[in-house]
């Protein structure tokens, strides 16, 4: 079920629990701004989620409320993860689902990194 992105941040969402160490993850990368881990249901040979360490519901919430330092740190972290995974040569796809129409299911901002295969020109659904 997609989330309602206008609801307040839910401290009990699954990624908040992963950040607190209450649920396990296959960690790929961590710095002061972000944590990256393998998606539990990968849709490509490489499918990694990058999440900010601070509590933001969505891309909308993050880009409206995060500080410039948080936004820069998070963007840099996404780039660091793709380079660590050696995807900067072959290329990769990034995706952020936002709210109901975007079919966002977890109410903590996450960027999907897809790699390890050739993607089609565009994903519309
Ligand atoms: P969304 O549809 O919100 O953009 O994507 C949520 C993603 O989180 C999905 O790709 C889903 O497979 C992944 N996911 C959901 N629960 C867990 C979990 O407990 N652990 C991990 N690693 N990924 C999860």
Image (spheres, helix red, strand yellow):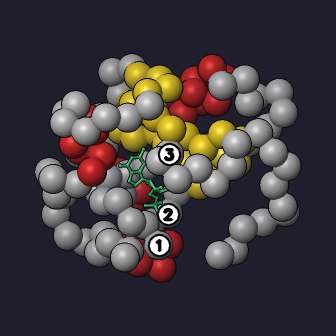
Dividing the image into 4 quarters, which one contains the C terminus?
bottom right
Image coordinates of residue 6 in percent, x first then y, are 25, 72
- Disc 1 designates what residue? 103
Q: CA distance from mark 3 to mark 2?
A: 14 Å
Q: CA distance from mark 2 to mark 1?
A: 6 Å
Q: Residues within 10 Å of mark 2 (few under 14, many from 20)?
A: some
Q: Is residue 5 left or right of residue 73?
A: left
Image coordinates of residue 81 in percent, x first then y, are 57, 27
Q: Residue at x 21, y 42 (%)?
A: 17
Question: Of tags 1 and 3, which is closer to the observer?
Answer: 3
Marker disc for residue 24: none
Reading the chain from its start, which is encountered first: label 3 or label 2? 3
- Asked if the beta carbon under badge 3 is closer than 8 A to the nearest atom of ligand 1, the reply is yes
Q: Residue at x 52, y 53 (%)?
A: 41
- Asked if the beta carbon under badge 2 is closer than 8 A to the nearest atom of ligand 1, the reply is yes
Reading the chain from its start, which is encountered first: label 1 or label 3? 3
- Image-quarter location of ligand 1: bottom left
Q: CA distance from mark 1 to mark 3?
A: 16 Å
- Disc 3 designates what residue? 39
- Asked if the beta carbon under badge 1 is closer than 8 A to the nearest atom of ligand 1, the reply is yes
Find out whether the residues at labels 2 and 1 contact each other: C-beta distance under 8 Å. Answer: yes
Q: Secondary structure at mark 1?
A: loop
- Disc 2 designates what residue? 97
Query: How many numbered marks have been drawn onto this rendered protein structure?
Result: 3
Q: Is residue 58 left or right of residue 21?
A: right
């Amino acid at each position: 079920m997609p989330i309602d992105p206008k609801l307040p941040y839910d401290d009990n969402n699954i990624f908040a629990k992963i950040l607190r160490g209450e649920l396990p993850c296959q960690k790929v990368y961590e710095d002061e701004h972000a944590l990256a881990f393998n998606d539990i249901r990968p849709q490509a040979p490489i499918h990694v989620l990058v999440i900010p360490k601070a509590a933001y519901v969505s891309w909308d919430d993050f880009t409206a409320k995060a500080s410039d330092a948080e936004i820069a740190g998070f963007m840099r972290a996404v780039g660091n993860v793709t380079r660590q995974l050696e995807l900067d040569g072959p290329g990769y796809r990034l995706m952020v689902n936002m709210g109901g129409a975007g079919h966002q299911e977890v109410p903590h901002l996450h960027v999907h990194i897809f790699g390890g295969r050739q993607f089609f020109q565009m994903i519309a659904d």
